Amino acid sequence: MGCDGAAGGGGERMEEDEAGASTSSSSPPPPIAQLGYDQVLSILRLLPPEAVLSFAATCRAFRAWASTDALWEALCRRDWGARATAALAERRHDRHGGGLQAPWRRVYAEVARLGALSARRVPVRGASPRPRASHSLNLVAGWLVLFGGGCEGGHHLDDTWVAYAGTGAGNRPPAILSWQQLASGTPGGRFSHSCTLVGDTLVLFGGITDQGQRLNDTWIGQIFSEEHRRMRISWRLLEVGPLAPPPRGAHAACCVDEKFIVIHGGVGLYGSRLGDTWLLDLSNGFQSASWHQVGNTWPLPPPRSGHSLTWIGGTRMVLFGGRGSEFEVLNDVWLFDISDQYPKWKELKYDLSSALGELPFPRVGHSAILALGGKVLVYGGEDSQMRRKDDFWILDTPALLQYESGSKKMTKKMWKKLRIDGQCPNYRSFHGACVDTSGCCVYIFGGMVDGLVHPAEAWGLRFDGHLYQVELLLHL
């Protein structure tokens, strides 16, 4: 089907393909031309976009079949998920008022060649959460949920704040948000914990108190929406049996297919960096669960804290950056797969001489979330001299997986630095970040930011209390 020349870079390939049509051949029609239209579409839905474009370049008839809106909507749904595609469809409908909308093929191409973000500081009405860092921020059932963190003076916080931001399914977020502080009854105050979203339920683990105590408790937070745009969270300890990960904070965590939570590394007792990996099995729901340690199969990522672990679909997740045992700051990338009986890590090594300028600098305390199109959006963090960063990068999952499978030419396509339009959140580390249902809109709150330098200080430091909204800049 003319797929031998297919390569990565679907966005560029689509752009070239739209520039002109291929000429038809006078040779006898291939056997596939004798198949019915529905049969051909069912085959095309199984192929990667590059193969579909190669098929379209064969002749005019195939080009028409491979350009149908139904096919590309199915590819979007397959590659981005049903919820994200439905949310994006409603957003497109809302933007065009029900009029002529961009075809799904162009939408796919726009996401593939994403190069910029738009950002704005969200105005807030009324009381706001206290400035903080190393807190958690989640978007669940349309609500931003902010919990805990550390604040000025080295103290932890035990408060929970919520703000309604919309469902992300075509509903534009309010121009001005209103924070509400919830009543007490939450887990004990802490910072550097993890709070992971599983469906519409929060799972909180670990953290550090301002006395330096490391925690290893596991909490479930159930969301209950009430009338007049109000909500409440019911927290309870999760029954996990006798086995639990050792106490820690500044670890990384992610949810895998709403069935498991994986945590890795962190700062343990006496300030030691950890390199272990644990899995929380939620297959029996939220009444009870069980932790078990993932076996140490070589190679393993070096121990670290302040890194990120991001689920990229299926049974795979990506680890990036952090601070190592010798306080060095890292920018290595590891792929973790739990599909086999023996889960395994694989470092994605690249030739730095050929990729210079194409890789983000080492960092700790950054955020990394999975955005639309299988793109891991990395923002901020700080280096070994506590110099904070304000850059946005995307780690492209399709290119990453092709590189992992042996295609070394994909090195320069794995990472891309994005341009920021509007009010950039500026330099910060140890902030909170979360993404909406569509995968297009990211919220960022707080963190440690650069402050004024006083004579007795080596550097300025302050905690931020502003909320930013960052969106993928797509021309639909």
Image (cartoon, rainbow, N blue to C red):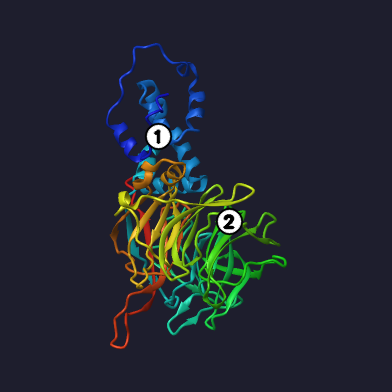
Q: Kindly identify which numbered label has been placed on residue 365.
A: none
- Mark 1 or mark 2, which is nearer to you? 1
Q: Work out whether residue 139 or residue 329 is closer to the camera in this orientation and state it.
A: 329
Q: Work out whether residue 362 or residue 174 is closer to the camera in this orientation and state it.
A: 362
Name the spot of residue 216 as percent of width and height, x first.
Answer: 61, 71
Q: Work out whether residue 179 or residue 350 is closer to the camera in this orientation and state it.
A: 350
Disc 2 secondary structure class: loop
Disc 1 secondary structure class: helix
Instruction: Determine the residue positioned at 30% across, 58% down.
Output: 420
Name the spot of residue 58 as percent of width and height, x first.
Answer: 37, 23
Identified by mark 2, the residue type is Gly
Name the spot of residue 339 as percent of width and height, x first.
Answer: 60, 47
**Quarter-wise, where is residue 173 in the image?**
bottom left
Instruction: Determine the residue positioned at 34% across, 45% down.
Output: 113
Report which residue position mark 1 lands on. Answer: 50
Name the spot of residue 65 as percent of width and height, x first.
Answer: 42, 26
Give the quarter of the figure containing the N terminus.
top left
Report which residue position mark 2 lands on. Answer: 199
Q: Residues within 10 Å of mark 1 (few under 14, many from 20)?
A: some
Residue 457 higher or lower than 95, as above or below: below
Real-space Cα distance between discs 1 and 2? 32 Å
